[in-house]
Amino acid sequence: MTAFVIDASVAVKWVVEENGTAEALALRSQHRLIAPDLLAAECANILWKKVQRRELLENEALLAARLLQSAEMEMLPSRSHMEEATRIAIELDHPAYDCLYLAVAQEQQCSFVTADERLVKKIREKHGSAGDLVLTLREAGAKPKRESDR
């Protein structure tokens, strides 16, 4: 089974219907998923924002949070990736919390999947060989499974 590091932009699509939900659900059912524990705080913040914008009712956001809380994925402590995330953030001139996912992907030797296509573009333009590690949600869905994964 292929492993992917995912960020909150992917995980929230499991519980909130939006563009990319089908791809995010397919990724969840077909791959081993990994994320830094920062994902929990980021998902909670996204759900809060959706309530503030009146995109979700409070009870819908709480249910979504409960479902994400129990979702099957491997959560890794962020602390051990702090230095690498900081280095990447400085190199990319981009917020470190997004760079933490790339640091985890590098350490786990797997791809980082995000629905944030601007972030993918920035990593590919400025981060050299690590650009090969990042995939858009659409690209990850189109990526054929290796024969050994079947």
Image (spheres, grey):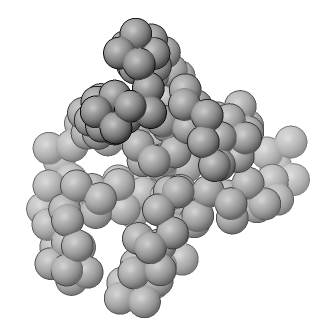
Residue shown at the point (68%, 35%) measured from the top left: 25
Residue shown at the point (39%, 81%) measured from the top left: 122
Residue shown at the point (52%, 45%) measured from the top left: 10
Res 13 visible: yes
The quarter of the image holding the N terminus is top right
Q: Quadrant of residue 90?
A: bottom left
Q: Position of residue 59 (x, y in %)?
A: 40, 10
Res 109 visible: no
Count numbered badges in the picture.
Answer: 0
Q: Position of residue 113 (x, y in %)?
A: 53, 56
- Left of 29 or right of it: where is 16? left
- With respect to residue 118, does 2 lie above or below? above
- With respect to residue 82, does 72 lie above or below? above
Q: Position of residue 75 (x, y in %)?
A: 36, 32
Residue shown at the point (47%, 80%) measured from the top left: 121
- Of residues 16 and 138, the one nearer the viewer is 16
- Left of 139 or right of it: where is 42? left
- Of residues 52 and 93, the one nearer the viewer is 52
- Left of 73 or right of it: where is 27? right
Q: Quadrant of residue 53?
A: top left
The quarter of the image holding the C terminus is top right
Extreme front residue here? 54
Q: Position of residue 52 (x, y in %)?
A: 28, 33
- Of residues 12 and 73, the one nearer the viewer is 12
